[in-house]
Image (cartoon, rainbow, N blue to C red):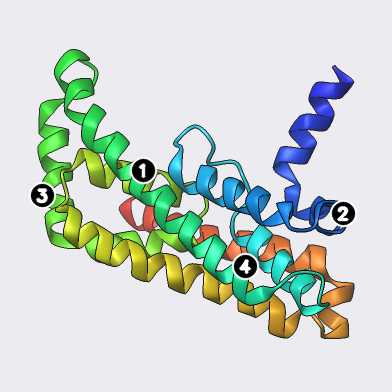
Amino acid sequence: MEIIKNVIDFLLHIDKYLEVIVHNYGTLSYLFLFLVIFCETGLVITPFLPGDSLIFVIGTIAAKGAINVFLLFFVLTFAAILGNTVNYWIGNYFGEKVFAKNPLFRKDYLEKTKEFYRKHGGIIIIITRFMPIIRTFAPFVAGIGKMKYAKFQSFNVIGGVVWVAFFLFGGYFFGGIPFVQTHLSGIIYLIVFISFVPPIIEILKRK
C-alpha cells in the first residue's frame, strides 16, 4: 500500500520532484516532460496529471541553467499539440460508435455538440488550454463533434504555443525573483485556482 501511495503522490505532485529528475536524468528529462504533457493533453484517462504548474516550475528550473528553456519550449509545445491531435482523433473515431451503441448517450446531444463546435470550436480549443481537466476533454469532444480537422489543428497549434509560452517563460523570467522562489508552492496553488475560475463562473451563470 505504501508503494501505491508513493506512486500516486508522485503522479499528482510531479512538479515537486522536477529538480531531482532534471539533476539525476539530464537529457532524459526532456522525454519525461514530453510524455507527461502528451498524456495530460492526449489521453482522457489522465487529466489529473499536472500541466500549468509543471510547465511553470520547469521554467523556474531552466532559469537556473539546469535545462535549456528554448529546447523545452519546442519539446513541450510539440507534446501539447500532438496530445490534442491524438485526443481529437480518438473522439472522432469512437464518438459516433458510443452514441450509436449506448442508449445513455442521446443522439440530440451529439448533434448539439457538432453545432456548438461549428460555431465556437476554435476559441474553445484555445481557452480550454488554460483550464485543468477541461483541456483534456476539449479536443476529445471536438473530435466527437466532428469539428473540421483543419480548423481544429490551426487553433490547436495557436493554443499549444500560447499555453506553453505563457507558463514556461513566466516561470523562466519570474522564477528568479526571491519572492517567487520563497512562495513557489503558494504561486503554484494560485495558478491552479485561477485556472478553475472561468469554468466555475460559467457553471454559476448557467445555474
Marks 2 and 1 close (CB-CB < 8 Å) = no
Residues at marks 2 and 3, CA–CA distance in whole angstroms:
47 Å
Residue beneath disc 1: 86
The mark that comes first in sequence, 2 or 4, is 2
At 79% from the left edge and 37% from the top edge, which residue is drawn?
9
Front one among 65 and 124: 65
Q: Amino acid at mark 1?
A: Val
Alpha carbon separation for disc pair 1 and 3: 22 Å
Crowding near the residue tagged with mark 1, few <14, some 14–19, many ≥20 C-alpha atoms within 10 Å:
some
Query: Disc 3 marks which residue?
Result: 115
Position of the N terminus, as image quadrant, is top right
Q: Can you tell which mark lies on residue 61?
A: none
Q: Position of residue 62 (x, y in %)?
A: 75, 73
Residue 97 x %, y %: 19, 22
**Which residue in the structure is indicated by mark 4?**
72
Expressed as whole percent of the image width and height from the top left, the position of residue 120 reads 19, 61
- Establish if 127 lies above or below 13: below
Give the mark nearer the N terminus: 4 vs 3.
Answer: 4
Q: Earlier in the sequence, mark 1 or mark 3?
A: 1
Q: Quadrant of residue 195?
A: bottom right
Mark 1 lies on a secondary structure that is helix
Residue 63's image quarter? Answer: bottom right
Q: Tell me the kind of residue under disc 3.
A: Glu
Q: Nearer the viewer, mark 2 or mark 3?
A: 2
Q: Which residue is mark 2?
A: 20
